[in-house]
């Protein structure tokens, strides 16, 4: 039974290195009454990705996160979706490894990934809603939860290439983990617990999964009152 859901997409690209998972997404797209376009042969570069997606004349893309395992691509899905976003092509990032990859390869690009959808939450309605959110943001309508604000970020712990930090204006009691590479070289050389920065963060995000961090600058410790952060 075809589910009648209104959306502007006539054709939706499916990018996934796992044929079985790609078929599941294909079926869900068909359930909305739209035409899935399968990219089965993989990509040699991000430029190749953008060129082939444009040539296929799809209105949007559903892209898996882990694309390297079967030599399907030389980049991750987060990189693909971010490049498509820059190219004004709506794209939803999906994954079975949301929480694992979020802390490493996804968080640095989260500002250019309007929707991150776990694969166990995929159904026709969620795909349509996700694509529509991506299209809206590509067109310049950014929801409040995705708008960055300059705010304090306090480093709590440094674990190799990962950093645990607090954003008091978002939630002073929930730590966020991200790669230290997000912080500019000159600021992260001697990174240590209790270092403080200002950064652009979407502090209206409802969940930690949606937080992104950009444009770090130093934030000197002013006085004892700062210890509450």
Image (spheres, rainbow, N blue to C red):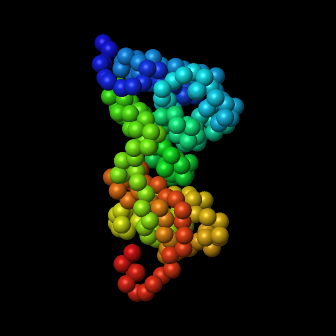
Residue positioned 54% across, 28% down in the render:
15
Residue positioned 49% across, 58% down in the render:
213
Q: Position of residue 228 (x, y in %)?
A: 36, 78
- Above or below, 12 against 110 in this view is above
Residue positioned 57% across, 21% down in the render:
56
Q: Is residue 173 left or right of residue 44?
A: left
Residue 224 in sight from this viewpoint: yes
| Quarter of the picture holding the C terminus | bottom left
Farthest residue, direction bottom? 224
| Quarter of the picture holding the N terminus | top left
- Is 60 in front, or is 205? 60
- Is 25 in front, or is 83? 83
Farthest residue, direction front? 140
- Above or below, 212 against 126 in this view is below
- Above or below, 65 against 51 in this view is below
Q: Is residue 47 left or right of residue 213?
A: right
- Above or below, 37 against 122 in this view is above
Q: Position of residue 43 (x, y in %)?
A: 66, 29
- Is 13 in front, or is 141? 141
Residue positioned 34% across, 64% down in the render:
171
Q: How many marks?
A: 0
- Is 106 in front, or is 71? 106
- The image quadrant that residue 9 belongs to is top left
Q: Position of residue 107 (x, y in %)?
A: 51, 51
Residue 120 in sight from this viewpoint: no
Q: Position of residue 121 (x, y in %)?
A: 36, 34
Farthest residue, direction right? 44
């Amino acid at each position: 039974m075809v589910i009648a859901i209104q959306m502007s997409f006539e054709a939706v690209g499916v990018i996934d290195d796992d044929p079985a998972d790609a078929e599941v997404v294909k079926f869900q797209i068909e359930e909305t009454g739209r035409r899935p376009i399968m990219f089965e042969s993989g990509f040699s570069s991000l430029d190749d990705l953008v060129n082939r997606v444009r040539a296929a004349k799809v209105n949007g893309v559903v892209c898996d996160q882990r694309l390297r395992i079967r030599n399907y691509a030389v980049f991750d899905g987060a990189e693909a979706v971010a490049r498509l976003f820059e190219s004004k092509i709506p794209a939803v990032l999906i994954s079975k490894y949301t929480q694992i990859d979020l802390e490493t390869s996804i968080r640095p690009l989260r500002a250019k990934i309007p929707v991150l959808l776990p694969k166990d939450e995929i159904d026709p309605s969620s795909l349509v809603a996700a694509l529509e959110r991506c299209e809206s943001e590509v067109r310049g309508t950014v929801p409040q939860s995705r708008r960055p604000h300059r705010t304090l970020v306090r480093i709590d712990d440094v674990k190799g290439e990962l950093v645990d930090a607090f954003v008091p204006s978002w939630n002073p009691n929930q730590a966020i983990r991200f790669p230290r590479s997000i912080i500019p070289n000159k600021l992260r050389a001697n990174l240590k617990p209790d270092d403080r920065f200002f950064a652009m963060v979407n502090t209206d995000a409802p969940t930690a999964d949606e937080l992104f961090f950009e444009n770090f600058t130093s934030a000197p410790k002013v006085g004892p009152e700062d210890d509450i952060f």
